[in-house]
Image (tube, grey):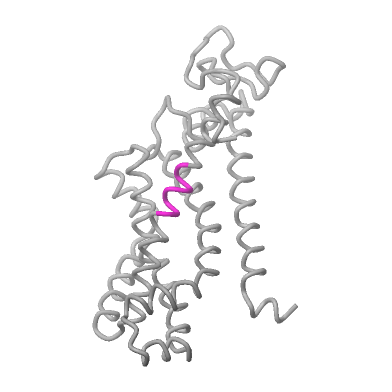
């Protein structure tokens, strides 16, 4: 739906038509119209594109450096690992939403900056997960054998450790995708995310749904249901991946 938004959306998501403002769901407007006469279904479809960009962009921008940082700190250990973990502790002590708002306020509230803000805290948090997974693999016999055979550290990390921590990476990606979409919606709802008239599920809830939740409840239902379904679906997908990829859970079954 997000990929083919321009084809699937029946109307321009920002085109206004006051003559049909605040009309309920009908044959011509399946999800109704907002206070400016804009088609809600079209805005939902284009809002899905924003969510896709945020989910994919923030997930990639988080997991790639988080994985490399986690592998590096676990493999090197010592003072380097200790100092990096203390930085992670300091960042995690800051409430996530406050950190997001602070970064977006400094950088600006466009799509790229929102993705960067969402990724900042996630890099450090996920690097700790990758560090734990790496520490288990780094003590395995085949990693020790590679070291004894003279393999360079970079080769050991990329060829022997990285492929064996792919299951938690995949699970983190699937779970993080939904969480980043929800975080962007929270920012937009508070006025720090995607700004109107651009279509975003978060600003649809804030600028349209909240103001007319009693007079025009369909403005609230659409983005709320869309957010719930996407986040629930990605969380279920992540749980299913964990069940398939985690050998301990397979053994329990």
Q: Residue at x 46, y 34 (%)?
A: 203
Point out the stretch of residues depicted in magenta.
Answer: 53-60
Q: Look at the magenta stretch and give its main secondary structure.
A: helix
Q: Position of residue 244 (x, y in %)?
A: 66, 69
Near-viewer residue (185 or 7): 7
Determine the residue located farthest toward the right in the rendered image.
253
On the picture, is 72 further left or further right than 22? left
Near-viewer residue (85 or 140): 140
**Residue 119 occupies which quadrant of the picture?**
bottom left
Q: Residue at x 34, y 62 (%)?
A: 94
Q: Position of residue 125 (x, y in %)?
A: 40, 66
Residue 125 painted magenta: no
**Residue 129 occupies which quadrant of the picture?**
bottom left
User: How many numbered marks appear?
Assistant: 0
Q: Please determine whether, in this image, residue 20 is positioned above or below residue 212.
A: above
Q: Position of residue 29 (x, y in %)?
A: 65, 18
On the picture, is 247 further left or further right than 203? right
Near-viewer residue (244 or 31): 244
On the picture, is 108 further left or further right than 171? left
Quarter containing the C terminus? bottom right
Q: Please determine whether, in this image, residue 30 is positioned above or below residue 111.
A: above
Q: Please determine whether, in this image, residue 188 is positioned above or below residue 62.
A: above
Q: Residue at x 47, y 37 (%)?
A: 50
Quarter containing the N terminus? top right
Q: Residue at x 60, y 19 (%)?
A: 10
Q: Position of residue 133 (x, y in %)?
A: 47, 77
Determine the residue located farthest toward the top in the rendered image.
19
Near-viewer residue (107 or 168): 168
On the picture, is 52 further left or further right than 224? left
């Amino acid at each position: 739906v997000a990929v083919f938004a321009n084809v699937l959306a029946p109307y321009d998501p920002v085109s206004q038509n006051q003559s049909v403002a605040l009309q309920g769901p009908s044959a011509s407007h399946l999800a109704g119209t907002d206070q400016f006469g804009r088609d809600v279904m079209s805005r939902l479809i284009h809002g899905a594109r924003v969510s896709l960009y945020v989910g994919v962009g923030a997930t990639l921008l988080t997991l790639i450096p988080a994985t490399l940082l986690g592998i590096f700190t676990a493999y090197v250990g010592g003072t380097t690992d200790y100092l990096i973990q203390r930085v992670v502790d300091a960042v995690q002590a800051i409430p996530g939403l406050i950190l997001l708002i602070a970064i977006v306020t400094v950088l600006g509230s466009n799509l790229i900056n929102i993705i960067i803000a969402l990724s900042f805290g996630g890099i450090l948090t996920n690097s700790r997960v990758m560090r734990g997974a790496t520490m288990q693999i780094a003590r395995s016999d085949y990693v020790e054998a590679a070291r004894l055979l003279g393999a360079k550290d970079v080769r050991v990390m990329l060829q022997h450790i990285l492929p064996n921590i792919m299951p938690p990476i995949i699970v983190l990606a699937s779970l993080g995708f939904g969480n980043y979409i929800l975080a962007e919606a929270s920012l937009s709802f508070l006025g720090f995310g995607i700004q109107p008239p651009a279509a975003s599920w978060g600003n649809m809830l804030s600028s349209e749904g909240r103001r007319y939740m009693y007079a025009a409840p369909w403005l609230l239902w659409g983005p709320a249901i869309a957010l719930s379904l996407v986040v629930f679906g990605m969380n279920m997908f992540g749980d299913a991946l964990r069940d398939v990829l985690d050998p301990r859970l397979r053994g329990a079954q």
